[in-house]
Image (cartoon, rainbow, N blue to C red):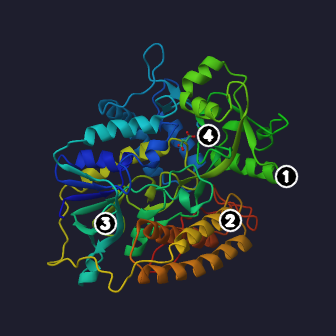
């Protein structure tokens, strides 16, 4: 299959790119499960934009820089923040519904480390609403082909044909038929989301296996800042609820973190208390849990007007109620969990990676906006801003393509009779990554993880060569590589900064330096 633009992923960044690029070319979007199986669809908070009368672009820039702890790229932050109000307009034009005040203004929520109310939202399911509107706009579009249940295996490189390593498409597995398709394109755009499934506990959906980062790294693209894994402080703690986020917007509306005995604790950690930035709140909870041996802490909303809580957070209230927790009467049991990858595939201001023809947008990219710790609700904004920029940048891109493209071939691979290996390896990686590369790290823990991932990667490599591919095996291979990259990046950072906290180096180094990791040159940084 030949197209102009191949998009891998169907969240906010991928679909907004598809819509804009379809104005000047044919677009194929591959998405590995249903089109709405995305991190975007699970986003609760909203989109940050400085539009309130008491707000300013400078304030939004400053809040982003402070949260990023020295590692944000100021030019990128200024560009994204300045584009925020336009992107909110575009969302409205696309038919996204956003909550309004009784006087008709956009209702603005507040989240951790924001000095002002600036998060536009639709109830507590903003991502779902954006996903709905984007899918409706894409549906039936003459220039857009959506291939659901299609999983990209590897990117195509001109290097295999004696050229520079320019990317010209991907091998893609049709999960329904088991056939592998070769899709070539002028530009290949990674919009494949996050890496949360590398950790045992995560707020992410099952699709978040870091496929984009893994494929780009294997192609030789520079990746960076992968040690900065954001742990969301408040994911529901309940045996029958997996991955259910309790949005930071609850704390923005006055929710207070408490211990089981009802005592507050955040005042011991930061003047912004429960509304401090995520790294601080997650570390504080981790510390309190380790001190007391408790399983969880609690988020208390019971002092707020019940009708307001139910109207502002209908989805959270209903889900909790279905599990026997009335959030207007009882504090919500919460724990931290892996939520967002701040690093990713390195890009320039136009979303271009270090490989010609390859672009990265959304969570899989490292644009320089988030630095060492992402400010809440800046990610949907980043997805909109960069998908717009990439769509403009690829307009006149030349096509790289060999005369004859080699079809996917797996020689003597046979059907696996030992699929349990995949499940066990997957489970083992997620467990030790949680224990050793979690909220507080140390040299010893990182080294333990490093030894384990090397053994597992050897096993997975062998398995990958011997047996026919399945989507589970492709994801496991990616997950293991991303775990390795997180470990290597963490191993090299000899300081505590933003989301990377290590008990061996509790202080920040005087100079903030990005980490970089790239296949050709070996890990650096
Ligand atoms: C939340 O609603 O707490 C998540 C928002 C975000 O991750 O930006």
Residue 113, label in figure: 4
Residues at badges 3 and 1 in contact (C-beta under 8 Å)?
Answer: no
Depicted 237 relative to depicted 414: above or below: above
Q: CB of residue at label 4: within 8 Å of ligand 1?
A: no
Q: CA distance from mark 3 to mark 2?
A: 40 Å
Left or right placement of residue 55 versus residue 22 in this view: right
In this figure, which residue is indicated by the disc labeled 3? 172
Front-lying residue, 269 or 66: 269
Dot placed on the residue nearer the N-terminal end, 3 or 1: 3
- Dot 3 falls on a residue whose secondary structure is strand
Dot placed on the residue nearer the N-terminal end, 3 or 2: 3
Dot placed on the residue nearer the N-terminal end, 4 or 1: 4
Q: CA distance from mark 2 to mark 4?
A: 22 Å
Query: How many numbered discs sit on the rendered protein?
Result: 4
In this figure, which residue is indicated by the disc labeled 2? 495
Q: CA distance from mark 3 to mark 4?
A: 40 Å
Dot placed on the residue nearer the N-terminal end, 2 or 4: 4
Q: CA distance from mark 1 to mark 2?
A: 24 Å
**Counting other residues with Cα less than 10 Å from the Cα at mark 2, is it few (<14), some (14-19), or many (20 or more)?**
some
Q: Is residue 334 visible?
A: yes
Displayed quadrant of residue 492: bottom right
- Dot 2 falls on a residue whose secondary structure is loop
Provide residue 478's location: percent of width, then percent of height: 47, 69
In this figure, which residue is indicated by the disc labeled 1? 291
Which is closer to the viewer, label 1 or label 2? 1
């Amino acid at each position: 299959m030949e197209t102009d633009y191949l998009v891998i992923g169907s969240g906010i960044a991928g679909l907004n790119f598809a819509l804009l690029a379809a104005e000047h070319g044919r677009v194929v979007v591959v998405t590995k499960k249903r089109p709405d199986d995305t991190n975007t669809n699970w986003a609760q908070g909203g989109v940050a934009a400085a539009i309130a009368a008491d707000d300013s672009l400078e304030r939004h820039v400053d809040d982003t820089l402070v949260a990023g702890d020295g590692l944000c790229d100021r030019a990128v932050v200024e560009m994204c923040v300045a584009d925020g109000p336009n992107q909110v307009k575009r969302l409205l034009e696309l038919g996204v519904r956003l909550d309004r005040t009784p006087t008709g203004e956009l209702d603005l929520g507040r989240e951790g480390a924001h000095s002002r109310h600036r998060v536009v939202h639709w109830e507590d399911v903003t991502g779902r609403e954006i996903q709905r509107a984007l899918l409706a706009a894409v549906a039936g579009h003459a220039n857009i082909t959506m291939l659901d249940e299609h999983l990209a295996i590897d990117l195509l490189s001109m290097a295999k044909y004696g050229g520079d390593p320019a990317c010209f498409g991907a091998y893609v597995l049709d999960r329904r038929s088991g056939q592998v398709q070769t899709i070539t394109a002028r530009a290949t755009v990674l919009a494949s989301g996050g890496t949360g499934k590398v950790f045992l506990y995560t707020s992410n959906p099952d699709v978040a296996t870091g496929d984009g980062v893994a494929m780009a790294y294997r192609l030789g693209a520079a990746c960076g800042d992968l040690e900065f894994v954001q742990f969301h402080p408040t994911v529901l703690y309940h045996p029958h609820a997996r991955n259910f986020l309790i949005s930071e917007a609850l704390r923005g509306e006055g929710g207070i973190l408490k211990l089981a005995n009802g005592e507050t604790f955040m005042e011991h950690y930061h003047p912004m208390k429960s509304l401090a930035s995520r790294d601080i709140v997650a570390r504080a909870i981790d510390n309190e849990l380790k001190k007391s041996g408790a399983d969880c802490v609690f988020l208390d909303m019971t002092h707020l007007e019940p009708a307001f809580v139910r109207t502002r957070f209908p989805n959270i209230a209903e889900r909790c109620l279905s599990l026997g927790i009335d959030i207007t009467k009882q504090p919500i049991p919460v724990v931290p969990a892996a939520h967002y990858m701040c690093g990713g595939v390195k890009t320039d201001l136009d979303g271009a990676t270090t490989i010609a023809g390859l672009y990265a947008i959304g969570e899989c990219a490292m644009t320089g906006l988030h630095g060492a710790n992402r400010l809440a609700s800046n990610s949907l904004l980043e997805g909109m801003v960069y998908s717009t920029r990439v769509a403009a940048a690829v307009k006149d891109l030349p096509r790289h393509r060999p005369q004859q493209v080699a079809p996917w071939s797996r020689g003597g691979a046979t059907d696996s009779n030992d699929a349990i290996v995949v499940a066990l390896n997957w489970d083992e990686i997620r467990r030790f990554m949680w224990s050793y590369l979690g909220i507080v790290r140390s040299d010893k823990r990182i080294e333990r993880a490093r030894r384990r991932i090397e053994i597992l990667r050897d096993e997975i490599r062998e398995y990958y060569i011997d047996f026919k591919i399945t989507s589970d095996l492709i994801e496991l291979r990616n997950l293991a590589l991303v775990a390795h990259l997180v470990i290597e990046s963490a191993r090299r950072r000899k300081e505590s900064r933003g989301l990377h906290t290590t008990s061996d180096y509790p202080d920040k180094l005087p100079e903030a330096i990005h980490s970089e990791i790239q296949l050709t040159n070996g890990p650096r940084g």
